[in-house]
Image (cartoon, rainbow, N blue to C red):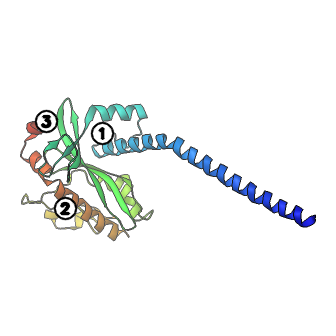
Amino acid sequence: MSDKTDKNSKKNVIVFALLLSVICSLMITAAAVGLKGFQTINMELDKKINILKAADLIGDKKPSKKEINELYHAHIKEVMVDGQGNIIETWAPNSLNLYFYQDNNQIKGYIIPINTRGLWGKIYGYLAFENDGQTVSGFSVFSHSETPGLGGEIESAWFQKNFKGKKILNSKNKFVSVGIAKGKAQNLPRDLQDNYVDGISGATLTGKYLSQGIKETLVKYDSVSVTFRQKQLKAIKDKQ
């Protein structure tokens, strides 16, 4: 009788554990499904914030959700372009995402997404340009895996503000991109200073990978930059 009771007791424990596992799994699944909508909304909002930051439309302030959506709707136009920089209506192989930022229906510049290797993982951000096709107007990083206090400084305001006013063309009007210096950009030869931002102490590799990634991305978007440099804004605007 004792053995039977012991077996029943063990069986009850196992059944209880299984039921508890099933219930917990269902609760976790329900929570994940229920929160997915909020996560999607927050990701979209974060994207808008960083695009607006890159375009220098919100600075360091923290606008409300309503203000963010209003600013984005009023000033940002998302399009796709092909390899020649032409705006296309539907996705195609090798198509690229591009964002125009505008004011009073005038295109003030454009923003390109940055997706590059870092030291410990991917670095995601946005790089904005004035409508001259060569001057950086802003830079933002919204996701990375770099070391806090070292490479992680790429998300700090002081680092990102360094990009404003930098050029992707050198003194001979040749494309060179914009890179991160090893130390202070002012220590470089004068003809290179416009093409580099200050580096981060102790984060040489992060700077190296980010520089490489920015350059590779700018090469892909070169046709867009050339179009702006040639002052062909009306042709682009008419296709929107």
Residue 157 visible in the snapshot: yes
How far apart are the two marked residues, 3 and 2, measured between alpha carbons? 33 Å
Residue to which mark 2 is pinned: 193
Q: Residue drawn 36% across and 33% down?
A: 69
- Badge number at residue 237: 3
Amino acid bearing label 2: Gln
Amino acid bearing label 3: Lys
Residue 18: image location, x then y, percent: 70, 56
Query: SS at mark 1?
Result: loop
> Would residue 123 appear left or right of 197 to someone viewing this image?
right
Residue 15: image location, x then y, percent: 74, 56
Query: SS at mark 3?
Result: helix
Mark 2 crowd level (few <14, some 14–19, many ≥20, 10 Å Cα):
many
Q: Which of marks 2 and 3 precedes in the sequence?
A: 2
Q: Which of marks 1 and 2 precedes in the sequence?
A: 1
> Would residue 204 appear left or right of 112 to someone viewing this image?
right
User: Residue most toward the right?
Assistant: 1
Residue to which mark 1 is pinned: 57
Q: Can you say which quadrant of the picture contains the N terminus?
A: bottom right
Res 10 quadrant in image: bottom right
How far apart are the two marked residues, 1 and 3, measured between alpha carbons? 21 Å
Query: SS at mark 2?
Result: helix
Q: Residue drawn 14% across and 52% down?
A: 83
